[in-house]
Each structure stands twice: as C-alpha cells, then as structure tokens.
Image (cartoon, rainbow, N blue to C red):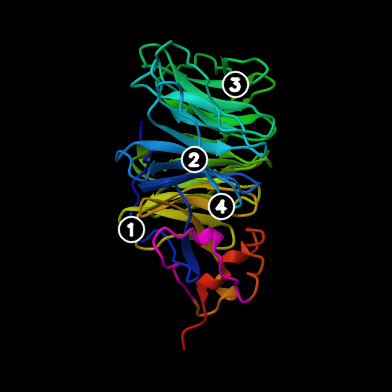
Amino acid sequence: MRGRIGSIVAAGALAVVTASCVLPISDLGGATSIAGGVDDTGVIVGLSELAGGTPGIELPTKRLPDGTVIQLDLLPGGTTAAAFRSNSHGVVIGYGNAALSTPSERAIRWDDDGRALDLGSFGGRGWSEARDINDAGLIVGNSSTDDGSVSRAFVFDPPVGHIVELASLPGGGASYVLGLNDDGLAVGYQRGSDGFARPVLWDVPAGTATDLTPRTGPALPTAINDEGTILVQVPNGPNGLLPDEIALLEPGASLQRVGPTSAGCLPIDINDQDVVVGYCYAGGPRAFRWDRASGMVDLAPGHPSFAWGINNAGTIVGSSDYRAVVFVVLPDDENPGGSAVAPGGEGRDAYDSPFDPPEPVPPVDGLGTADSTAAFLFAPPTP
C-alpha cells in the first residue's frame, strides 16, 4: 500500500503544552496500529497488525465507543486493508487489495455489519481508494486508468452503484480528491495542460468544479468542514521550495495563512470549530493540533507521531510510537503547573480506563467536553 508521508519541517516549529498526553487505544494486538479517523458518534477506524500475525500485514479495524474492536472484512482474495473514515450511520471507507487487483489497492465501502464492497476502478486492474464519506452516504475517492498512470477523482453514490468521475476543469488532466463535507462539497486538485496542479472545489450534487487558484494561488486543499471552511497546504517561497504553511479559506473570504511560517506541516483534518490536526517533521514526524487560541501544539513531544483525524467533540486520533492513540490537550490554565502522565500497563486501552477520575475534566474551548475517563491522567502541579 502506498504511504502518505508528507512535507519536511524544520525543528522547533511546535509549541509544547504542559498538559498534553497520549492515550493508547485497543487494537488487534499486533506490533503496529493506526487510528485513521473518528466520527461524531465516537467510532474510530484504522488498521492494525494481528497478534501473532505476519508482520506488515495490516487489517482494517472499527473501534466502537464502548471499546469493542471489530476486524472488518477483507475483499475476496485480499490479504490487507485500511479503514480511513466513517460516517454517523456506521459506514466505513478505505482501501485494500483483492485477488483480482493485486498488487493494486481498491476502494472499499464497509457497511455497518463490516461487510466489504469493492467500489471498482476506472480501468479494470487499475488502483482505487476511497478518501472520505459524508452522512448522506456519498463517497469520494480516486482511481487510475488500467495502466495505473492517471488518477481521476470520483464519487460513489450507493443508489447509482458505481463510481462516477467528478467534474473537470477546462483542459484539466489528472485529478485527486481529498475531502468531503455533509453539503456534498469536495476539495482536492487537478493538473492543467501546463502540468501544474490547481486547487479545486467540487460541488458534487451540482456536478461542477471550481478552480480556487484566484483565491489561493498555488495550494493543496486537504479537507473541508461543514461550515465550508477549506483547509489548505500552501507552498512557501519561490517555486514552493521552502516548507509549507497552513492556511484556511472561509466562504467568501480571502486566504488566511495561519502558520507556521518558519517551518511547514501537512494539515490533514479540520472540524467545524476550525481546529486543525496533522503532522510535521520536527526531528521526526510529530503530530500537531492548531487553533486560533493556542496556535501550534506538539501532541506527543519527543515521539514519532501522526494525527489523522478530529471530530466535532475535539477527539483527535492518530498514532504515536506506531500504535493507535487518542491525543488529549488541556490548556495550561486548566492545569496550572501540571504535567501529563502516560498510563501504565502494556496493552491497556487507556481511552476506556476502568479507573474512576476524582472529578470530571472541565470543558475545553474549541474541543467540547473532554472524555472524563482521561481525568486521572493529569497529575497535580509539582511543588
């Protein structure tokens, strides 16, 4: 399966918030796992190696709010798959291999019972992947032609039953979609006849594509929230040779560059409160969280980590030290002088801790109400 490692970032770009910690969550027991996305019902999807299984063979997972982890089905003849996003109706999307598509990956839709449906491709044995899903069940993704050389963005609508290419810009070539919101607006890019990538906003129900270049300049939109705010990665410097910046494009507004300016990061997801998560390279991959109040926050100081998703309650999921985790941030003014304490016990699902906290974690602006099971992880101030 193709990796999704992004931009290089200079060290020192991330601020460290004292009260931040990493909560490992249950997986299939193998050496590595990733939490790829979290929806507004608290379902977390991703991938995991199986305990006692073959190293490097990743299986798709769906973790329910009660902590139960379900191994989703593979495609017929398939050996590996990854779940990337889910909606509030229990439908999960991602990609995996199958007997007829090996070694290429295929876009997959899993129903609420975990059954896998191969969404197909535009070219027989070509690759495809599902990137996002909304609560109406629309799925967007990308597929190649038969030789695997050209990517085309697609939409899958269950009543239609097959993938359909998204609208193209005039003279447009290869296209790639990355995010979708509940209004059916999708973002990504398309290469023009000059070979340069142009940021695109698709109105999927209307069947239109809009070139965002006049508003953004050269840019890569990576996600869009239900308020219509687009998360953008902007190359910095001449010819984009310097590290990238994070920017927001709100409906009817100009592009807002929000940083960092001294280093670049790959923004992955944004919730409806404009809280952004992703990862940077600061002495290695480092998960970050950004909002207007706190700026950039290093979610796992000193540890290789990635933040892949955030929901509207502020739950952030990803991986740290190659295991699926939930990241928790508590502002310093809610825990003055305190420190974050990692839970002990190998294999414990800290996000479903059996311990009763002494008091609930207070609500955090921009994050909603923090999970009360995490309260005991925040140590009192050091004398």
Residues shaded magenta: 339-358
Q: Tell me the element at label 1.
A: loop
Q: Is residue 121 above or below residue 265?
A: above
Secondary structure mostly taken by the magenta-highlighted segment of the chain: loop
Asked whether residue 27 appears in the rendered view, the answer is yes
> Which residue sits at x=64%, y=21%?
157
Numbered badge on residue 156 = 3
Classify the position of the N terminus by image quarter: top left
- Is 95 a magenta residue? no
> Is tag 1's residue or tag 2's residue first in the polypeptide sequence?
1
Between circles 4 and 1, the one closer to the viewer is: 4
Residue denoted by label 4: 67
> Is tag 4's residue or tag 1's residue first in the polypeptide sequence?
1
> Is tag 2's residue or tag 3's residue first in the polypeptide sequence?
2
Numbered badge on residue 61 = 2
Image side of residue 235 versus residue 310, left or right: left
Residue denoted by label 1: 11
Between circles 1 and 2, the one closer to the viewer is: 2
Q: Is residue 324 above or below residue 158?
A: below
Q: Would you say the residues marked 2 and 3 are in contact, meaning their CB atoms lie under 8 Å apart?
A: no
